[in-house]
Every structure is written in structure tokens, then in C-alpha cells.
Amino acid sequence: MHQVKLADNIYYLGYNDRRTHLFENIWPIPNGVSYNSYLIDDEKVALVDTVERAFIDDYLEDIDAILEGRPVDYLVINHMEPDHSGALRAIVMKYPNITLVGNKKTFGFVEAFYMKPVNTLEVNDNSVLELGKTKLQFQTIPMVHWPETMVSYEETNKILFSGDAFGSFGTLDGGVFDDEINLEFYENDIMRYFTNIVGKYCPHTQRAIKKLAPLDIKMIGATHGPIWRTNLDWVLSRYNKWSTYTTDPGVVVVYGSMYGNTQKMAEVIARQLSVRGIKDIRVYDASKTHKSYIINDIFRYKGFIVGSCAYNNAMFPNVENLITTVQHMGVRDHLLGVFGSFAWNGGGVKNLMKFADSCGWEMVADPVEEKGALKAEKYQKCIELANAMADKILAE
Ligand code: FEO
């Protein structure tokens, strides 16, 4: 296969997954995903992370092709989630004298997922591993994405091996480096990877960005998506924006509706938002659009107006699923509106209001709830809800 190098002695070992439908068995990946590992060939040989287990055979073969029989001395484990540690056992079996490099939280995961590790090297912040002319410095970045997560900084070429940080959904279709691809094509998948996978950990991401700021970084090799060597500011500025909950002036309107009554309220609200001059309005039926995409737009836009019919005295299940995920992710600093409909004793709006009371977002107006089909009085309330949201958005 083509050998892709980041530097004279540093190789990209990445694999494109176009078969998996759901990443983590939750998140749709219609454009696939890549799993990126890196090999440093010096007096000592080190791998930085491995790959998903479906690619073990190709991975071992490609390592052999580079090393021509020499062993791998170190496996640096930046992150233990199985999409990157999937080949760990195979690597240890093939190179039994290998030393696993991790921090104090890493090896417990190795034992829990695979085996009791034999040869280990525990590193901490600022520890340096010398491989010959290559030196790897380590920095922990806990919860970006798991507690053990760390990055490795290669000092000669100033390459940051960043784990999930700065990663992306989407396979690498020929182009591997950021300047070989059209970033516009990847932008949504880069954001969706961040919001879906790392979005719960925005404060941790901010801490990591600040911690890594003193490093002189010329290249970033993440565990998914393109290698960044030309447009580092492009991705860094976006990560900074997303992880500070900085939003654009738009509104996401989501509804759950069985017979169209709650949907009609959503249409009225969306139209009035437009009349008031809001240009970015995204209306989603929670039964049709996967929450992956809706959450991405909730991160993107300041306003969120959510509606639910009642269902068995509760929220409509697909709205409830979305709201539960938004709560788990702890999304902050949004404007909120609530609406819905019911047939006898309600449940949709009542339970949405529990979310409203707990999320810490600003409610722009009282909730609007209709019995059955939308009628004149509640139509007007929907207009007022949209106006209140538009007033806040336009005043920002
Ligand atoms: Fe790509 Fe958290 O693993």
C-alpha cells in the first residue's frame, strides 16, 4: 500500500471504515470514519495508538512492511476507547517484549478490556520518552474523551498526536492531509464528531486547549479524520468556538407529533421566526431525523424551540430521547421555547418544562399548549413565542 509519512521516520497507519452504520452503535456515519494510528521508526520503534479490531490484519501487515522484521518497542496509549485500542492485544501477542506507555489511569483500562499488562511505562505531564533522535512528550487531557486520555508531542517535527481531539467523522478518500481535501466537505462531519462524541466535555476541552497552548505545534495527527499541517487555525478556532458554546444567530425547532397538531404549531413558529428576520431556522421532526444531526444544530444555533405531543402521559418518546441526550451533554447558554399539544390530561409540555427548569437556559416566553388541533388563541401564542425568541436572537 501507499506509505504516507508525516516526517522522514513517522508514518500514518490509517484505515477507512465504510461498513459501520453507527459509530459507538449510536451515531450515524453515512460518510464512514477513519481510524488513525502512527508509527515512529527510530532507534526504538513506537506505535501511537492502534486501530479498530476489524483492521488488525491490514495493520499488522503494514507495520511489517515498514519494519521488515524489526520489533515494535513501545505502544503509546493516548486513548483506550476500543476504536483505538482494538488491536492492542494483537500487538502485544506479536511483540511480547513491547512496553505499553500510559498514565496512571491507562493500565486499569488495559486490564479491564484486554489483559493484565506485563511491561509498562507510566508517564505524567511533561514526561519525555526518547526513541533516538525522536522525543515524545506527554500531556494528560482527561475527559477528552475518557479519563485516561493524553496527547503525545513529537518535539523534532512538532507533531501533536492528539487522540480524539481535532478528529472527524468521514473516511479519508484519497486525501489524508488537510491541504489535500476540501475542508468544506468535512466541516459538518468534524463538528458532528465533536458535538456527538466530545460535546459533553466542553469544559475539559477548554482546559486541554489552554494546557496545550504553550506547545509549538506544526502538525496534528488525530485518531480520526485528516492530519492537520496547513489549516491548524481553521480547526483550532472551531474547537474553541464549539467548546465555549459560542453559537450563531439561528433557531432549531424540533417537534414530536403523531397526528400533525404539534407539527402545525412548529410550522407557525418557524414561519413567524422567518417573518421576523431569522434566516437560519432548522425544523426537525424528532421521529425522522437522528438526534446526532439535531444536537449538532443545537450546538450551532442560539435558539431551541421544542414541542411535544403527549404520549402515555409523558413526552413523545423520540423527543424524550433527544431531550435526555441534551441533558446528558450539559449543553449551556441557549434560549429556550416550549410548545405542544394533548388530547386529555397532557404530559408533553409538562415534562418538557422539567427540562426547562433544570437546564439553566433562558425561557423566552411561557410554554404554549393546545388541546387537539391548533385554534386561534394558541395560534397567537405561537406567534408570540416566535416573536419573543426573535427579539432575543436579534438583540444579541
Ligand atoms: Fe475515537 Fe474516544 O475514541
Image: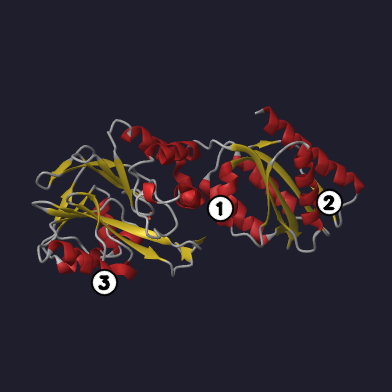
Disc 3 residue type (three-letter): Asp
Q: x, y (%) of residue 67?
A: 13, 62
Q: Residues within 10 Å of mark 2 (few under 14, many from 20)?
A: many
Q: x, y (%) of residue 222?
A: 34, 50
Image quadrant of ligand 1 equals bottom left
CA gap between label 1 and label 2 equals: 26 Å
Label 2 vs label 3, nearer the camera? 3
- The residue lying at 79 percent from left, 39 percent from top is 275
Element at badge 3? helix
Q: Quadrant of the C terminus?
A: top right
**Assess mark 3: CB under 8 A from ligand 1?**
no
User: Of callouts 3 and 1, which one flags the residue occurring earlier in the amino acid sequence?
Assistant: 3
Which residue sits furthest top? 395
CA gap between label 3 and label 1 equals: 36 Å
Element at badge 1? helix
Tell me the quarter of the picture where residue 345 sits. bottom right
Q: x, y (%) of residue 9?
A: 17, 51
User: Of callouts 1 and 2, which one flags the residue occurring earlier in the amino acid sequence?
Assistant: 1
List the residue tagged with mark 3: 57
Disc 2 residue type (three-letter): Glu
User: Of callouts 2 and 3, which one flags the residue occurring earlier in the amino acid sequence?
Assistant: 3
Q: Answer yes or no: is residue 117 visible.
A: yes
List the residue tagged with mark 2: 370
